[in-house]
Image: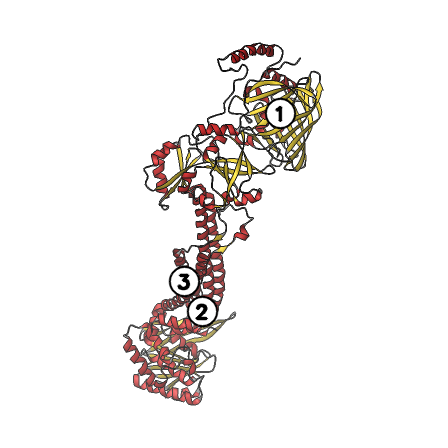
Amino acid sequence: MKIQIPNPKHQVPNPKHQETRDKENGGTMIEHQVIRVPGYQRIRGKGLKSRIIRLSIVPYALCSMLFAQSGEEIIAQVDRNTVVSTVSYRAKMLISLGGKIREKEFIGYTRGKEYSYVEFVSPARDKGTRFLKIGDEMWMYIHAVERSTKIAGHMLRQSMMGSDFSYDDVAENEKLRDLYEIEFIGIDTIDDKACYKLELTAKVPEVNYFFKKMWVDKKTYIPVRSELYAKSGKLMKEVSITEYKKVETKNYPTKLIVVNKLRKDTFTELILEDIELDSKIPAKIFTKAYLERK
Amino acid sequence: MKIFNLAWRNVFRHRRRTIITAAAISVGLAVMIYMDTMMNGLDSLAAGNIIDFETSHLEIFAKGYYREEGLFPLDTIIENPEFILQRIGKIKTIKGVTPRIKFQCRINNGIDELPVLGIGIDIEKESKVFETANTVVRGGYLKNQDDILIGKDLAKDMDLDVGSFLTIITRDQYGTYEAYDFTVSGLINTGHPLLDRNAALMHINIAQRLLSMHGITELCIKTRDDNKLMQLKQEIASEIGKNFEVYTYKELNAGIFEISGMKRSGQFMLALVVVIIAAVGIINTMLMAVMERIPEIGMLKAMGFGNYNIVKMFIYEGGIIGIFGSLFGCFLGLLASFHLVYFGLDLSHMLKDLDMIYPVKFIITGEINYMIVLGVFIFGVVVSVIVTLWPVRKATKLEPVEALRHV
Amino acid sequence: MVEVRDLHKSYKVGKILFPALRGINLKIEDGEFTAIAGPSGSGKTTLLNAIGCLDIPTKGDVLIDGTSIATLSTKEKAEFRKNELGFVFQTFNLIPVLTAYENVEMPLILVNMPAAEKKERVISILEEVGLSEFIDRKSNEMSGGQQQRVAIARALVKKPSMVLADEPTANLDSTNAKEILSLMKELNKKKKTTFIFSTHDQLVMEFAERIIYLRDGKIASDKKK
């Protein structure tokens, strides 16, 4: 039996909505988006209907705590999938911008959550471009220049290797629980798979996407689909994970497509091949010296 | 008869030499004057465009805003412009003040995206400071909240027209992505490449909403007296204090005016080179002419003319030729310059696809700087005298007999 | 009075030093009408130039009325020429586009004299040389004889004490030459101006009162008539 948790009233931020509010305020600008407090929503009203609804929420809420997981826990599970002691892989990236297609190849190493290293091997003009990420800091090395640069400040907002991502888009994915209020909405079916549907709303101003929707596969805890929204409520990007590799208890995504919903024929496809999980990777790979090696 | 008369007669005696020398000088000077006139026109045009559309006469920023060219940071903004407005309200020479928000964004028509500069404007105050409202060539100015103005050229590049929808994609001051739909209410054609090809104008409060901010990035100030900008800058700076920076349009576009300055000295160098080449040619002619007259110089010496008088005579000769050449050169130069001033040079075809750093377009009209014309005139005379004198020096060193004997 | 003392002058001709004058000693008194004669290359022009301080001697000196030319600076020499000497050359050396008047007027540019007086001087000297009808004629429109007369007028307009004439008749036919020489003789008598000629023209020597023969840079003979 499926437990339906009633959806507390929520709104997707909507430009029209904001307009009315604007007019109410006499045309001044809005301070900030309303941050909703998830979980137990206060139902207003003193009438009987409201009281009944209020009363009936309680057991449902209790059930949700007992049987289903909260949004946070679901995300925690998702995270657990991708945290491995080490990964090494070869990747192909297909970038389409307005129909113009480019292909790139790179190899990568990741250790835990802190360390990752990427080196491009194709095409020729990208060959030798390397990235090193340690914690929150990222460096880039371009073979032609023979120097490494720290990617910081407004550089983080630039496009990564000509794709539709920016550097800080990538970084954000690891801190969802810190940045967003995560609410479990219900069960949805995506490509014949049952998924937990989650809605993520920014709880601090410093996020890239104010609002996200995520569908997490119940069985594999892979976020098979994510929708990324702008402040105005416009859908900007759609991220799909279509393939994964199972390694013992973990499911590691191996094919990812990001579609730009605002621009025709614009997407990035990432395919990970030759994945080795939990193998031994020499520590020196995650050093600046290695990044800058000749 | 005096030495001057003698010199005068000599000039007309050697008609061909005189004409060649004077002609060479004329052409060189005419070129210098014309180029100067054109450069003045370009400068004014550039300045005009910058003042009319981009920065007006002065801009006030929060301190630290203008740290990197082309950055448009949203973390260093003016939070309460009222403070500034109140302080500078008493300055009489200010004609108008308008707030603006400038931010980097992308314009998206569903198929293509282009990076542009988003500019949030206060349409009422803008009209006292900028001419943008007068440059709408299709459609209308900003009316509804979701209206946006783009340049005619940008519209063409992105296949947009009045009534088209477009999305502005940007990141607010915290980095959050925003994508907001606008309707093109009008197309502008200002002559300033920045606004015509690389900018999108919207209501300032919409810009603030997109960027999640209350403040503004700059206040633009127009003054009645554009000759006293540095004074006005000091006056404003002392009124508003250390938390803000004030710049004149020249300081804000130092790069462009530097280019102009460099172009100027480059142009001057070029003209100088032209004149020197002409001078070298003239020297050659003069050398021959003076050589021919060495026996004559000998005779003058025999008659008791000292070197001083002989040199004086040649100075007069050079001066007379120089004055003729300079007069004619200035005449030609001014003639060409007047044409440039009243009819202008239509470059709109040539410059259409050029990505101009220099904010001009279309028709270049000139501006004559009479001080330069005078300077050029004097220069022509001086050059002519030097060129005549230089071969004579050698001749005067000869003994009379050697001179008389000279073939 | 002109005194020439042990005058030497050598020219460099290519690499060879050619001695034109090899020690000249002579005296010429005021008012003389003297010819320095000799074959070509004898040094007569050189001697005349030295006397006229148009050239610097290699050795020796020329004294005019006691003043040693060698001690004068270039400026002083020019002043000297301006005040004391007049020159007449074989090739006339007039300025072609100027009129007779203007040519004769030229030496007067250097003096401070009221314009009216200058005008009077020029016209009167032109009359004296018989060119009163050619006053406004351009010199390149005159015959050789007429031009030489203009040259003489020019030489005399500042009333110099001495006129040096180098081959004045060489470019004239015998009729004109005779006329010129008579004219100069007349002026010599009238104004007491010293005339010194350098010449190889027989005609000149007939008119001269004293002939100094030069040969190979030395005085061969010195005869008074």
User: With respect to residue B367, does B402 lie above or below?
Assistant: below
Q: Do the residues labelled 1 and 2 touch (CB within 8 Å)?
A: no
Residue B351 in picture, x, y percent from top left: 54, 50
The disc numbered 3 marks a residue on which chain? B
| Residue depicted at 29% across the width and 75% down the height | C115
Which of the two discs, 1 and 3, sits closer to the camera?
1
The disc numbered 2 marks a residue on which chain? B
Residue A262 or residue A94, whichever sits in front: A262
Q: Quadrant of the N terminus of chain B?
A: bottom left
Residue A235 in picture, x, y percent from top left: 58, 29
Q: The residue tagged with tag 1: helix, strand or loop?
A: strand
Judge whether residue C167 can be spotted in this image.
no
- What is the three-letter code of the residue carrying label 1? Ser
What distance separates the C-alpha of mark 1 from that of mark 2?
87 Å
Q: Name the residue under label 3.
A: B381
- Position of C225 compared to B185: left or right? left
Q: Which mark is residue B18?
A: 2
User: Tag 3: Cα neighbours inside 10 Å, few (<14), some, or many (≥20)?
Assistant: many
Q: The residue tagged with tag 3: helix, strand or loop?
A: helix
What distance separates the C-alpha of mark 1 from that of mark 3?
80 Å
Q: Mark 1 points at which residue?
A: A226
Judge whether residue B95 can be spotted in this image.
yes
Residue furthest out toward the front: A48
Residue C23 or residue B44, whichever sits in front: B44
User: Tag 1: Cα neighbours inside 10 Å, few (<14), some, or many (≥20)?
Assistant: many
Which of the two discs, 1 and 2, sits closer to the camera?
1
Residue A190 or residue B26, whichever sits in front: A190
First-in-chain label (3 vs 2): 2
User: With respect to residue A75, does B127 lie above or below?
Assistant: below
